[in-house]
Amino acid sequence: MLIKSAEFVVSNQDVSKCPKSNLPEYAFIGRSNVGKSSLINMLTERKSLAKTSGRPGKTQLINHFLINKSWHLVDLPGYGYARVSKQAKKTFQKFITAYFEKRKQLVSAFVLIDIRHQPQPIDLEFMRWLGEHQIPFSIIFTKADKLKPMAIDRQVDDYMHKLSEEWDPVPGYFITSATKRNGKDELLSYIESINNQIRP
Ligand code: GTP
Ligand code: MG
């Protein structure tokens, strides 16, 4: 899929204020600093469409981006950031949960995982929660440029092996690097194929 246009639409903390249109929507979720916003910029080839930062906790709202005037990409705040207050954590959790529970336009979530990390309880719990709520999702391994090819294979094998202990079938996955621009075509083709199934 060629990205012809990518525009910021709206940011808010309230799912009822998200765009009313019925366009299919894909949301990026994962721990703070995993690379959600960077991946959105890489996919859309826009340097600073989504705001990124070396410090975790940059994205604090539900951000809608309109792609090719026909579907939405959604950038969400990260979970598991230790340095925000308990109150802020609760607020985040509330509106992220409400977004996933209520947003009818959501076609699929992408759970981003830093390829260097071993499976973390917070990510495994979040995927479990998505499963319980019957929200389709795939995994996106990020920052693949940080590892050599053999280490990438090993990390992915280990991660999927861990998931196979509780998932059958295991979720689909993509391997990406925002800095090296890896995984862009695979991800965009996947989204395009789902969009085509929805609106042939
Ligand atoms: P929050 O909004 O805080 O939840 O973070 P986020 O998940 O949106 O992460 P963001 O895209 O802001 O990136 C966090 C940091 O990781 C930044 O310093 C990025 O430059 C870096 N980063 C993101 N993707 C990659 C990647 O593919 N490779 C490398 N090496 N660094 C990356
Ligand atoms: Mg972000």
Image: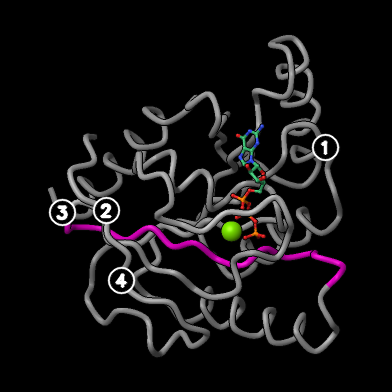
Picture quadrant of residue 173: top right
Q: Distance between the residues labelled 3 and 1?
A: 37 Å
Give the mark nearest the N terminus, 4 or 1: 4
Q: In this figure, which residue is indicated by the disc labeled 4?
A: 9
Image position of 153 (left or right of 67): right
Front label number (1 vs 2): 2
Labels 4 and 1 touching (C-beta < 8 A): no
* SS for dot 3: loop
Q: In this figure, which residue is indicated by the disc labeled 3?
A: 199
Image mark for residue 6:
2
Residue 130 in the image, given as x and y percentages of width and height: 62, 63
Q: What residue type is labelled 4?
A: Val
Image position of 120 (left or right of 194): right
The stretch drawn in magenta includes residue 75:
yes
Give the mark nearest the N terminus, 1 or 2: 2
Q: Quadrant of the N terminus?
A: top left
